[in-house]
Image: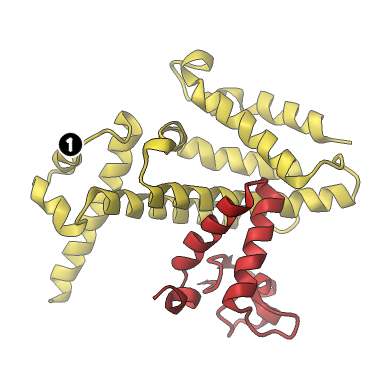
Amino acid sequence: MKVCIACGMPMKEVAEYAGGDTSKDYCIYCARPDGSMQSFEEKKAGMIDFIVRTQGFDEKAAAQLAESNMKKLPAWKECFE
Amino acid sequence: MSSKRQLQKESTRKKIIETAYLVYSEQGFNATTATIAKEAGLSHGAIFVHFPSLDELMTCLIEEFGATLTLELHSLVETNKSMEELLRIYLEVLIKHEKFYSRLITERSRLPEEVRMTLANLQSLIAHHFNNVIEREIDKQTVKKIPVHMIFNTWMGLTHYYLLNKDLFSPDTPVLERYREDIISTFLELIKR
């Protein structure tokens, strides 16, 4: 089982891989409609929206949280160097 | 480095993390690294060979705890679970880690920022599972149309309240296990349409 390089989600089922393609290292939630992986800015904005919508946190706190999460993920390592 | 030494190093590191989990569960995060070393049967210095600072040890520990919880939750939450099944799975996982989790939420403000962030990320993951189920149930009109974050926060508030007041709800036995059915059935009653 792989873990998505862009958000850290374990990918257990084929349907959880981007485009249902198990050779991909990122998940369905981190893919654009055309199947390519989202950019850093796109992913960050998506994570902030998601945190605000599902947990109701303050937007600034949500941004901090999203960044701290992304910092640990292989897909975004170079964005923090 | 020979692979044997590498293995030994890895197993000592694992031992420190496992011992820290137990010591912090029992004594809270004020427990010293000297206590952890003693319980693990290691010299005090050995801890710092593996974890140069206390912050680093705590961060690694919470990250591993998070990874364990993520896997446990993810492997249990199948795509078509109902709200009730999700609540049961969530409490099941929490019951397994009740002592440690309680320490995390009661002592949160005193933990290093990195650790607080890791804990918050863990909550986001739980929110993600909730979101999937709640949205489906709202669509099916089985759950009231309440904003997802308020359903989630109400659930977290309820479970945390029992954990934070364990001394009053269940001084001698684990609190979530004791009140599991009450908590689940009441919460479902509140959100069901």
Q: Circle 1 sits on which residue? A: B35
Q: Compared to B165, does A21 lie above or below?
A: below
Amino acid at circle 1: Thr
Residue at left offset 13%, top offset 69%: B5
The answer to whether residue B1 is above or below residue B32 is: below
Q: Which residue lies furthest to the front in this view?
A: A60
Instruction: Find chain A in the image and tell me its colour.
Output: red
Query: Residue A80: x, y in percent?
Result: 43, 73
Residue B68 horizontal side relative to residue B61, left or right: right
Q: What element carries label 1?
A: helix
Q: Dividing the image into 4 quarters, which one contains the C terminus of chain A?
A: bottom left
Question: Quick check: A51 above or below A77?
Answer: above
A51 relative position to A33: left or right: left
In this view of the protein, which residue sits in the foreground, B11 or B49? B49
Is B92 on the left-hand or right-hand side of B108? right
Q: How is the image coloured?
A: by chain
User: Residue B12: horizontal and vertical position, in percent?
Assistant: 19, 56
- Point out residue B176 in the picture as x, y percentages from the top left corner: 55, 28
Residue depicted at x 62% and y 36%? B156
Q: Can residue B177 be seen in this view?
A: no
Query: What is the number of callouts on the image?
Result: 1
Residue at image point 25% right, 34% down = B31
What colour do you see for chain B?
yellow
In x, y percent, where is residue A2? 52, 73
Residue A45 seen in the figure:
yes
Displayed quadrant of residue A20 = bottom right
